Amino acid sequence: MSILIDKNTKVITQGITGATGLFHANGARDYGTQMVGGVTPGKGGASVDGFPIFNTVEEAVKETGANASVIYVPPIGSADAIMEAVDAGIELVICITEGVPVIDMVKVKKYMEGKNSRLIGPNCPGVITPGECKIGIMPGYIHKPGPVGVLSRSGTLTYEAVWQLTSRDIGQTTCVGIGGDPVNGTSHLDVLKMFEADPATKAVIMIGEIGGDAEEQAAAYVRDHMTKPVAAFIAGATAPAGKRMGHAGAIISGGKGDAASKKAFLRECGISVADSPAEMAEALLKIWQP
Amino acid sequence: MFQPVFYCPKLNRFFAATILQQCYVKHSTDNRSDHLTICQRLGIWLKVSYHLSGIRENADPLSIPNLYEDTMNIHEYQAKAILRHFGVPVPDGHVVYNGNSARDWARRLGDGPWAVKAQIHAGGRGKGGGVKIAKTADEVRQYARDMFGMTLVTHQTGPEGKIVKRVLVEEGSNIADEFYISFLVDRATDRVTLMASAEGGVNIEEVAEKTPEKLFFEAVDPCVGLTAFQARKVAFKMGFAMPQVKQMVPILMNLYTAFVESDCSLLEINPLIQTVEGNLLCLDAKLNFDDNALFRHLRIRDLRDYEEEDPMEIEAGQYDLSYIALDGNIGCMVNGAGLAMATMDIIQLYGSSPANFLDVGGSATIERVTEAFKIILSDKKVKGILVNIFGGIMKCDVIAAGIIGAAKQIGIEVPLVVRLEGTNVELGKKMLVESGLNIVSADGMADAAEKIVKAVNG
């Protein structure tokens, strides 16, 4: 078992003819993911590296039966690409693209209300269920099937946590990079709920960062509802404070957002918090044995 | 009506989005005043300057920047020109670059009194002597002269302050009451949200902390925009009488339009005033823009004031590197914002401190990595460098090639610890070994941090 994706997931790549899209489509196929095709408007009917290309997502879904899509479309067209995938009934849309305007995402979120699709990202590394399905830009070999769920905003910091687990011979159920943008598809809390509901996941590592209060909301869920042990790391403890630009944002989201207060709150909620990024796996092993 | 009069030749670079990214636009200053006159007449807000949120040490926790909101900052007079374009009432005024033109513009603006306001990218100017009220045109000239070249220190500039190079001369207003309005994207609701208070002209954090009941929020549905009834609701809550409510509704709706159509990340009016005559007017305006959307706002992009930015951060921005200078002595080159922050954290945990934040991004080229080294090494405080790369998109052999290229080009004389992991890691490590360079290889973050701290501290 796993969350979001498994060996039956059929994936199309939006923006498959771009260098990044094609590189990672190949990488995912090599990993064993069912990469069933791609979409690039105007190149429908052709194929690239053995991937059939379609003009529209609708057509791609009809022809391939894809139920997931990964987006490498440049920022100017990312929001449109997400909405196209949602409209075509894709269940899981993963947007890797970095630099999507926030106002575009506000509109996308509104558009997605009442629809059955889940969006991961944008500005994220993707999702991997080790040994079964890899969608995104993470290096596959660092992962290993097993019982720990990993979730994070940051790409490379997720790899770090995964690597610490794998090198201790502890595998992962699914690793989810939710992306670092202010408005994104899926929150820490959403993913925690999925891990809680997944019987194969026995423990979770959650990686947070300074700013906002998403980690606090997730921690409150851990305290009130979660039966599985959770370890965490909050990046940015030493990040310098900035000019008073984000203050309106801090007020509206009601959190102070600094690392010290986040860590303190997470600990209050029973989460094992690592002070050092090199000790994320250790923090989990303090409260859980595989 | 609304076209760029002035084209900047170095404008075609684009900036991706990680952390407080900087970019800059080279502009010629020769015929600046001509452009200003033309553009003023055409109702176009004009280029010449802008700035991004700088990073300061030791600010209070509330002001920790949201590291993912890449924003561009502009001057007050530019913000007001944009608001004017969207039909929002602002005082008549003009930016000037010397005392005489300050006096001349004051005369054109009317009989006084006038406000003379230093234009820097920071708030709290009044307390530092950056805002004066003049009763005669000669006084305007004198105040403006006093301000030019002055280093203005406010609670937002940091102790080193900012040098005043532009001054806004504005018609004075008879203030009867002050209010607060802002728009921003609320992460909790994923909506553009209006925040308003009857307590204007003050520190809004204090209002939020002490009297949260005096703050009013209204989340906006992106399909229909801010509706008239929402605007009315807020206006009545703020305590306005009907004549002012009638003014307030279009002001709020136009501010929302300005926010969305300019891709703002923050629009703040503090204060909005009611004059003795009963008119509403935006006396000060702060606009920040979403860096990621600047590709569709070339006129706004032209407003960036590179003179207000750190030269090294500008340099880094040209190569799509996110660089923030800090006070420590260990230079860092990392891929990914989260890992970069974590690397800074672990350096601190091992008893030293980072000289910079530097994210080489997900698709760094050899050239970019070389530039990153040059930028790190240009900081004379740097006594050692830690490279921490976990490759996903970023391939370790590219990093290795960049390190070797940089070492050959500029020579790296400080200790260098490299930790590589991820795609093509073996190839990358092999390249470094075969290069014959003096590089300490590390396994894992803790090992890397320990080695670099030891190398630097002896």
Image (tube, coloured by chain):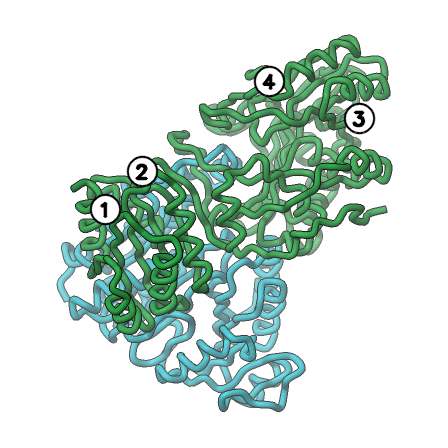
Expressed as whole percent of the image width and height from the top left, the position of residue B430 reads 26, 71
The chain containing the residue under callout 4 comes to: B
Residues tagged 4 and 3 counted as in contact (Cβ below 8 A): no
> Please, is residue B335 above or below residue B8 in the view?
below
Chain coloured green: which letter?
Answer: B
Colour seen for chain A: cyan
> Which residue corresponds to mark 3?
B92
Identity of the residue drawn at 51% across and 21% down: B153
Q: Amino acid at mark 4?
A: Gly
Q: Nearer the viewer, mark 1 or mark 4?
A: 4
Q: Which residue is mark 4?
A: B126
The disc label shown at residue B328, or none? 2
Between the residue at mark 2 and the residue at mark 4, the CA separation in whole angstroms equals 33 Å
Q: Position of residue A57 (x, y in %)?
A: 59, 79
Q: Amino acid at mark 1?
A: Asp
| Residue at left offset 50%, top offset 51% | A182
Density class for disc 1 (Cα within 10 Å; few <14, some 14-19, many ≥20) is some
